[in-house]
Image (spheres, rainbow, N blue to C red):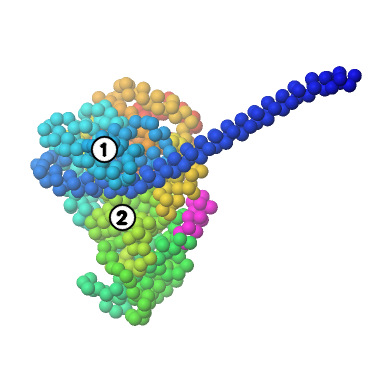
Amino acid sequence: MRKGATRNGLATAIPKYLSLTAILISSILFVHDRAELYKAEKEKESLKILAKERALEITEHVDTLDHKVRDWMKEHELSKFSNLTRSELRKVHWTSEVGGMIQEMRRAAIGEEAGGSSRLDQIKPLPGKKCVWRGCENPTQLTDQLIKNLEDEKRKRIAAAVSGKPVPKQGSASIGDLEQKMPDRIRIKGPTTDFSGNHPILALPQEKYSATSVSALVEGIYAPPMTGQSDGGAGKTCDGDFGIELMKRWRDLKAEFCSPLGQPSPKVGAPNKVSGSKIDCYVIQQTGHSGSDNMCSLENVVLDMAPYSNKDLTKKTMEDYKKTKHEDQAYMHFSQPVITGLCNVVGDKFNNEKLFPGWNKDWLWNGFKAVKDEGSRELACDVWEETPSMIVERDTFANMYHDTEDFWNVFLTMGILQLARDNTQILLADLYPWGPFKAIWTEAFGGKPPLTAWDMREKWGAKKVCFRNLIMGIYGPASSLTIMKKETKCVGSPLVRAYSDYVIRGLNMQAFTHAALAKPPTSVLVNYMARRSSVIWPERAFCDDRFFVCSEWSHLENRKLGRVVKNDKEVVAALQEMQSATFSGGRTMVFVDMDYNLLSFQDQLKTDCMTDVMIGPHGAGLTHQMFMPDRAVLIELFVDNSGANKHFHNMARWRGRGGNKYRPVSTQNPVNIDKIKDIVREAVNSIDITQY
């Protein structure tokens, strides 16, 4: 019995043992596999970080290429071809190519697939060197290689232009495809009547564009005045509310806030201290805004740069930004004055906090100190800055709508103070990285290279800097472009048209405008401005390991957007089919569906300049309508109950899109395809093809 029982017990125990062993082995293998997977993921993440660090280092070097290439072109090539026509010159200028390369690097930096086709992958190595861009040993090697390739390509372009042979298309392939689809858009060899008439800034040579003050470019030049009924503001007329008269009215409101004590510091042989300081502020009541808006010009003042080198302060600023999910912007809040001047405060000017909206409060209400003792050490500085410098704190850094508030405000401030591109330096005093709109800052407003907060720290460290003229710009949300909440009754602001031309000319995109064509085109380009969750959050995409430390944002993935058209693919397919339809008056329709998230800003602007009909859901992308031709139509789709906001209605009206040139469409989501097709067909047929 005992033997049988033992035998029976073994017979029962052995399978259990084997089963437990199998489970144990499986568990060990599972844990091993998970460990290997974890290890592989960590290695992959480490490689991404290393690649990002290299790409960011490379980007810093490549950011200088645009200017280097243009300088090289001017000094060694263009001087030999002074007789080239405007069109030929445009063919050999390819600033956007460098921007495209930088975009490619940024995409690699954020861990996108490395195996795809890229212009950078096609760059040929230097003779005797094996370096291709992902295999370059150091940024300098890549920079040398890029410059060599750019120079070779430049020579080919110039030779092609001179010989009259075809020149390779510039920008993205889709831009080239667009131009091929519209053979009626023949670019001329000189400015047209429309260039010099309705859009005079576009006709200016670079030197005159850069050296002439904004006020001189606009006042008495851009006409006619606005039409429509005043919106009941202090300006009393449409022009006084939103036109050129607004700029003049703002200038006339100049008031002294701090009167000088002592003689102004001499411009030659100035001592390392300030005297004769002065502050003039321009407080205005804008139409559509119940509060006061302000801009101030300071003369002979000291700015303490130490806060930018204060790691505790910059760290806290970024921690607050992250903790509040960017509700608390990347602005430093000063606990003590950072600006000092030898002047006497006028009355109770600095007692009214409401006169200093937004970040103006940090710099002037909290940050300014008037000193009356000429011998005070607080008036001493380490270095003088003679260029008029404008402090701007951006209303975020990667949103076309909110960033346009700042672009507009800088343009308007330059007009009020009668400043030119060449004699103005922009100080982006927030802690944001450059973001996707660097080209506007460096080209349209970059006569003197703009400086970010990090650049300011690198240039001046913790020094005290004496400024001959320091300007406190207009608070972003106080922009007259966006401040109106109700529908405007005013149409056609010459100031808004001038702003559009100023940006287009600054980025050298005037050759892509309708005004540069030999005659108005019969082709009508329909641009679908889609909203798609196609990019990761900008904090991760544009972090630069400066104030925005990349490891702090590595958890962010693709950004989920609201107001996305649910049947987006069906809309695209339907509009593509419409290209074969017949339209009145010999019109032809060309459709383009470009994801602006994936384009360089230069290519975005090129597309804007060629677009006749823009259609898309309410969102920041519709701000691009500012750069469309005069004859163009904007169709705004109000999906998901987004119809309350009137921003793009007002922008379109002020840009001159009266009547049916702005078409609001409230629609369900998914949208009705037949309804969309009917709306687009009506818009195409409404385009005046005899006009630019």
Residue at x 42%, y 64% (from the top left corner): 307
Secondary structure, mark 1, is loop
In the rendered image, which residue does mark 2 sit on? 450
Query: Residue 239 placed where, x, y %?
Result: 30, 53
User: Observer-nearest residue: 316 or 585?
Assistant: 316
Secondary structure, mark 2, is strand
Query: Which residue range is magenta in the image?
Result: 313-328
Judge left or right: residue 23 versus residue 683.
right
Viewer can see residue 312: yes
- The label on residue 267 is none
Residue at x 51%, y 43% (from the top left corner): 555
634 part of magenta stretch: no
- The label on residue 129 is 1
* In the image, residue 510 above or below residue 312: above
Query: Which dot, 2 or 1, sits closer to the camera?
Result: 1
Count the marks: 2
Residue at x 27%, y 58% (from the top left corner): 424
Query: Residue 639 placed where, x, y %?
Result: 48, 36
User: Observer-nearest residue: 25 or 591?
Assistant: 25
What's the CA distance linking mark 2 and mark 1? 35 Å
Query: Residue 149 placed where, x, y %?
Result: 23, 38
Looking at marks 2 and 1 on the same chain, the residue that comes earlier in the sequence is marked by: 1
Label 1 crowding class (10 Å Cα cut-off): few <14, some 14-19, many 20+? few
* In the image, residue 224 above or below residue 304: above
Viewer can see residue 255: no
Q: Mark 1 belongs to which amino acid?
A: Lys
Q: Mark 2 belongs to which amino acid?
A: Pro
